[in-house]
Image (cartoon, rainbow, N blue to C red):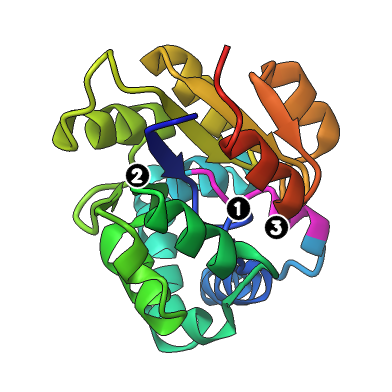
Amino acid sequence: MYDVILFDLDGTLTDSKDGIIESIQHALSELGIRESNVDKLVSFIGVPLIESFRKHYSLDATQARRGIELYRKHYADVGIQTNAAYPGIPELLEELNAQGKRLIIATVKATVFAENVLKYLKLLDYFVSVVGGDLDTDGTSKTEIVRRALSQSKVTPKQKAVMVGDRKHDVIAAHSSGIDSIAVTYGYGSLEEIRNANPTYCARSVEELKELLMKSPS
């Protein structure tokens, strides 16, 4: 069994799509950009915002940073309240916590927002730490966040650790950090994206995720 479990937040533990997309649309609208293609905006989830703004809309650094400011203001005021835990997630966290597993949040979402979401959903107490991005930076890569989470929590090589997430960035970060990965396919990453990242395991549901987390790693 795994001793330490790192969880992504959006698309892994919570269904947060509506609030995130609405906040992105608001930011873009304030920048003079109208975007109604929801599928395009889903690709923003789990990726540093500055990367997505610049990639998809060719914004310069100043415009992208302004977009982040607008997004964060709207998300703080409105978006957080649209979050919901996926069915079965609270029970899974409770069981893992009862078994003495060390649960850590590792997300590109700003730490303060991640903590507020978890408080809103009454899930915060299950985690020993929440490691996310900083409000005073443009964005932190998932690899850096995972490494920071492992370091801050003093995870030793003897402890079996795994990263659980729904995007390729979660799998890549796990590979780079020398730990296993479980890619969930019920989130926001496409099946092709996940398979191409070559995760250690895939889970099609919360029930399959539970089975994998109770399984001894190879």
Q: Nearer the viewer, residue 37 or 32?
A: 37
Q: CA distance from mark 3 to mark 2?
A: 17 Å
* Quarter where residue 177 is shown: top left
- Regarding residue 187, the answer to whether it shows in the image is no
Residue wearing tag 2: 139
Label 2 and label 1: CA atoms lie apart by 20 Å
Label 3's element?
Answer: helix
In this view, the residue in front, 165 or 63, is 165
Kindly identify the residue that appears in the image at 62 percent across and 48 percent down. Answer: 57
- Coordinates of residue 148 in the picture (x, y in percent): 23, 32
Rate crowding at label 3 as few (under 14), some (14 to 19) or many (20 or more) other CA atoms within 10 Å: some
Q: Nearer the viewer, mark 2 or mark 1?
A: 1
Q: Position of residue 204 (x, y in %)?
A: 81, 43
Type of amino acid at the residue the image marks with label 2: Gly
Specify the amino acid type for callout 3.
Leu
Count up the numbered dots: 3
Percent x, y for residue 193? 76, 29
For marks 2 and 1, the one nearer the N-term is 1
Choose between 188 and 180: the one closer to the eye: 180
- Neighbour class for label 2 at 10 Å: few (<14), some, many (≥20)? many
User: What residue sits right under mark 1 in the picture?
Assistant: 12
Q: Quadrant of the C terminus?
A: top right
Give the residue displayed 68% in from the left and 48% down from the top: 43
Pointer 3 or 1: first along the chain: 1
- Residue 77 locus on image (x, y percent): 41, 88
Magenta extent: 39-47
Q: Is residue 206 above or below residue 165?
A: below
Q: Is residue 90 above or below residue 57?
A: below
Residue 144 at least partly seen: yes
Residue at image mark 3: 41
